[in-house]
Amino acid sequence: MNNRDLLNIAEDFGSPVYVYDADTIINQYNRLKNAFNNINSLKINYAVKALSNVAILKLMNQLGAGLDTVSIQEVKLGLAAGFSAERIIFTPNGVSLKEIEDVSGLGAQINIDNLSILEQFGSKYPNIPVCIRINPHVMAGGNTNISVGHIDSKFGISIHQIPHILRIVENTGMTINGIHMHTGSDILDIDVFLYASEILFETAKNFKELEFIDFGSGFKVPYKSGDIETNIEELGQKLSSRFNEFCEEYGKPLTLAFEPGKFLVSEAGHFLASVNVVKQTTSTVFAQIDSGFNHLIRPMLYGSQHQIENISNPKGRERFYSVVGYICETDTFANNRRINEITEGDILCFKNAGAYCFTMASNYNSRFRPAEVLWVDQKALLIRKRETFDDLLHNQVSVDFTIEKEKVLVK
Ligand SMILES: *Cc1c(COP(=O)(O)O)cnc(C)c1O
């Protein structure tokens, strides 16, 4: 899709608007699949929390993906998109036993990340196989360093607690059918990732009835020029041969699973916003758009640097701008950024707006959440309407009451 297509979408659907390019998602999916084509049984479970629109889930379904979910609501969205429950894995953190039971009742694969729930679930349902989430305590630290992830992370069961896991398994008679890790940090260095994988293999040897090993995610995509990108092809080659070797050792073919979010959808997303005001101060030029961190929180929350293009004037002279929003709070998208000359009314396009953008949007300042559009086969399909004023009132309960007269100060 080109700038003309994006401008037409902003015109037809209004701004701000999120646009997702189906072809980019398809290419990323196929790239990952190809990188692991030496694996007999590969499962790519898309992490729903990155971008949970049902149309996106339907696209993933057509590609043959499974789903990685973190709430029962995400599981239900997956079912609504046509996924069968067996193709959904539930990898929550800190949810109630009740929620896990409910998801299990729907038929999804359960992944448990703490000993307390493992023991309770295993005692009640010894016949339902579960996956366990391990914390390998490995983090990338610089280029070649391998440092030990802090032991008090809230995610996963520490590898140092394997004896306790084994005792629970033995006491309850439950079956562990999968081993999982997701360190949450970016895979910058393939050797670090392979090192963590060795720990997972070592762990796996303790469990005789495994069906799969899930390596989570952490695939990094570039946001700005100079960013490191995970070399998927190299990772695919190295991890595949090591994985196949491990299956030989283990004595049984296993499924290799991943659960990428960002890698599949980040680059497919474009966020289009319109410039309301160009404001010069003594030190800078602000471009103020019809949005804020209520629609795209990543720059303020994580310091993410989304590239911003002025698609209304792509050939204009470059100048320095601070791009900010319209909410009553500091909501800086970019500081001192070189952008083609901006005039009020121009449409700015934020890149990498597919993952963790719309899904983190809110109604702060009582603004409507944006519309979402899927660009597929050269057509723009509206996949979520812009909210309306009714949406803001929808769950508010209208009550009538009068405070005591004496409480109202007249002077
Ligand atoms: C968020 C999440 C992912 C996806 O991470 P990305 O960085 O978007 O690829 C995968 N697995 C689990 C358990 C997650 O919580």
Image (cartoon, grey):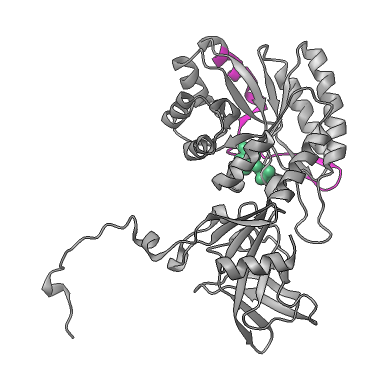
Give coordinates of residue 274: x percent, y percent: 60, 74
Give coordinates of residue 102: x percent, y percent: 43, 28
Assign the C terminus to one quadrant of the image.
bottom left
The residue under the point 72% across, 22% down is 255
Give coordinates of residue 253: x percent, y percent: 76, 16
- The relative height of residue 363 versus residue 28 in the rendered view (above or below) is below
Q: Residue furthest bottom?
A: 282
35 left or right of 67? right
Range of residues picked out in magenta: 141-169
Is any part of residue 118 visible from this angle?
Answer: yes
Is any part of residue 46 visible from this angle?
Answer: no
Q: Is residue 168 magenta?
A: yes
Q: Nearer the viewer, residue 183 or 40?
A: 40
Q: Nearer the viewer, residue 36 or 200?
A: 36
- Quadrant of picture, ligand 1: top right
Q: Nearer the viewer, residue 137 or 316?
A: 316
- The relative height of residue 177 versus residue 152 in the rendered view (above or below) is above
Q: Is residue 350 magenta?
A: no
- The relative height of residue 317 versus residue 73 in the rendered view (above or below) is below
Q: Quadrant of residue 47?
A: top right
The residue under the point 55% across, 48% down is 53
246 left or right of 110? right
124 left or right of 60? left
